[in-house]
Amino acid sequence: MAEQMSATASFNQAVTLQVQKRFAEALAAYEQVIRLDPSFVEAHYNKGQVLREQGRLEEALAAYEQVIRLDPSFAFAYSNKGKVLHKLGRLEEALEAYEQAIRLDPNDPAFHENKARTLEGLGRREEAEQSYLKALELPRPDGRCR
């Protein structure tokens, strides 16, 4: 119980550091959380976010893959895995990641937009157009119209 409290406290500190854009310190704090509780999914996810922000794409990819191993239903992990793969030029793999994110959460317009950009990169313009149209049909998370 005390270890979980310590992991939670460390996680909260890491989030604060990340919000303050103190990425090196946030990364160290997330790694501390993971040492205390290797199954702390959000710590792995946020570690991936920090690594991606720092341009450490291969490491970010590994973090997102760990999230998926721990929680295969974490749609945002697939989406962010797709973003990293896209930046690495691995478009087919990125497309697979976005498609999995959409299977898990078909109502997130960002997943459809990311898929569309990847399809464009693959030269699959008609499919990209369909994905963009799907994204436009869906309400935005902030509730505003497009």
Image: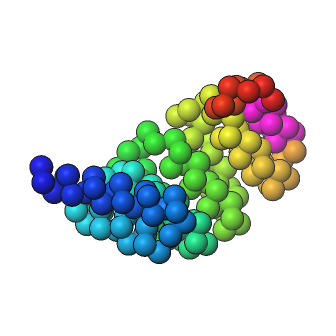
Which sits in the foreground, 17 or 44? 17
Residue 129 visible somewhere in the drawing: yes
The image position of residue 41, as x and y in percent, is 36, 51
In the image, taking residue 132 as reference, residue 112 lies left or right, namely left
State the colouring used for the structure image. rainbow
Please report the residue visible at 59 percent of the width from the left and 48 percent of the height from the top: 79
| Picture quadrant where residue 82 is located | bottom right
Which sits in the foreground, 49 or 144? 144
In the image, taking residue 48 as reference, residue 14 lies left or right, namely left
Is residue 6 rendered magenta in the image?
no
The image position of residue 119, as x and y in percent, is 78, 48
| Picture quadrant where residue 53 is located | bottom right
Please report the residue visible at 56 percent of the width from the left and 56 percent of the height from the top: 81
Boundaries of the magenta span: 126-136
Q: Quadrant of the C terminus?
A: top right
| Picture quadrant where residue 26 is located | bottom left
Q: Main secondary structure of the magenta part?
A: helix
Which sits in the foreground, 39 or 96? 39
Which sits in the foreground, 132 or 27? 27
In the image, taking residue 30 as reference, residue 1 lies left or right, namely left
Residue 69 visible somewhere in the drawing: no
The image position of residue 50, as x and y in percent, is 51, 65
Please report the residue visible at 75 percent of the width from the left and 33 percent of the height from the top: 135
Residue at the left extreme of this rendering: 1
Please report the residue visible at 41 percent of the width from the left and 43 percent of the height from the top: 72
How many numbered marks are there?
0
